[in-house]
């Protein structure tokens, strides 16, 4: 994975992250690794905890409600998610969504297709700095997933703060 990270066009990633709050990353995992990770999802004993998304009204298995990850006292401003399936092959729909509440303006939504499997996406977890007529402001950003219309969509999220 370090070779892919080193080879990324970081100027382009930073520019897209600054422009919309998220940016596509290069391939971080091989096909073999993505398949292996998908196969682990059925083994609940391997995970610290699981969440019934429908029970808590976070989604019903085929989508994820817009939310902000606000765990603990210290929150790292970025997260990375890695696609473990191929859109258009393994599933239809399931785009990654960002909704930015801009200061004194209408909210802006952006959707991203995470493709192909093994590629990553870095995004703002909470607030992002935006320039306004009055200087700099913090624009709240929420993220989620649009409805998966068919097939199965799996991702691996890397949270850089303590979610205990």
Image (cartoon, grey):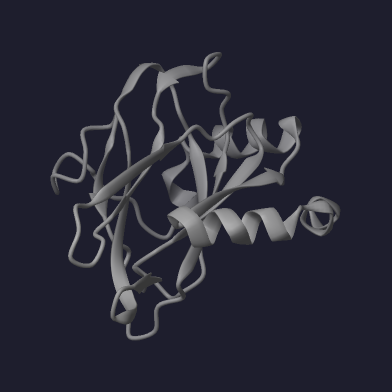
Q: Position of residue 6 (x, y in %)?
A: 83, 59
Residue in the foreground of this view, choosing between 68 and 21: 21
Q: Nearer the viewer, residue 53 or 160?
A: 160
Residue 135 % position (x, y): 35, 81
Q: Is residue 155 visible?
A: yes
Image vertical order of residue 85 relative to residue 6, above or below = above
Residue at horizontal 20%, vertical 58%? 105
Quarter occupied by the C terminus:
bottom left
Q: Position of residue 137 (x, y in %)?
A: 31, 77
Q: Residue furthest front?
A: 133
Give the number of callouts. 0
Q: Is residue 138 above or below residue 73?
A: above
Residue displayed at 33% across by 86% down: 73
Q: Nearer the viewer, residue 65 or 142?
A: 142
The residue at the point 29 percent across, 27 percent down is 147
Left or right position of 38 against 149: right
Q: Is residue 31 left or right of residue 19?
A: right
Residue 133, quarter of picture: bottom left
- Classify residue 122 as left or right of residue 97: right
Residue 152: name its quadrant.
Answer: top left
- Figure check: 55 above or below 85: below
Residue ranking furthest to the bottom: 73
Residue 71 visible in image:
no
- Residue 30 is situated, as x and y percent measured from the top left of the image, at 76, 37
């Amino acid at each position: 994975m370090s070779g892919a990270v080193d080879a990324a066009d970081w100027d382009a990633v930073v520019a897209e992250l600054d422009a919309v709050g998220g940016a596509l990353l290069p391939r971080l995992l091989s096909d073999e690794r993505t398949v292996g990770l998908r196969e682990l999802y059925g083994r609940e004993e391997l995970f610290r905890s699981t969440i019934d998304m429908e029970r808590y009204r976070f989604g019903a298995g085929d989508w994820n409600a817009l939310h902000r990850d606000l765990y603990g006292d210290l929150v790292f401003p970025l997260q990375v998610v890695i696609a473990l399936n191929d859109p258009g092959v393994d599933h239809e729909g399931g785009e990654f969504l960002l909704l930015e509440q801009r200061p004194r303006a209408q909210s802006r939504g952006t959707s991203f297709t995470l493709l192909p499997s093994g590629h990553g996406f870095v995004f703002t977890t909470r607030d992002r700095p935006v320039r306004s007529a009055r200087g700099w402001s913090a624009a709240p950003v929420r993220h989620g997933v649009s409805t998966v219309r068919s097939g199965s969509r799996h991702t691996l999220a890397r949270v850089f703060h303590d979610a205990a």
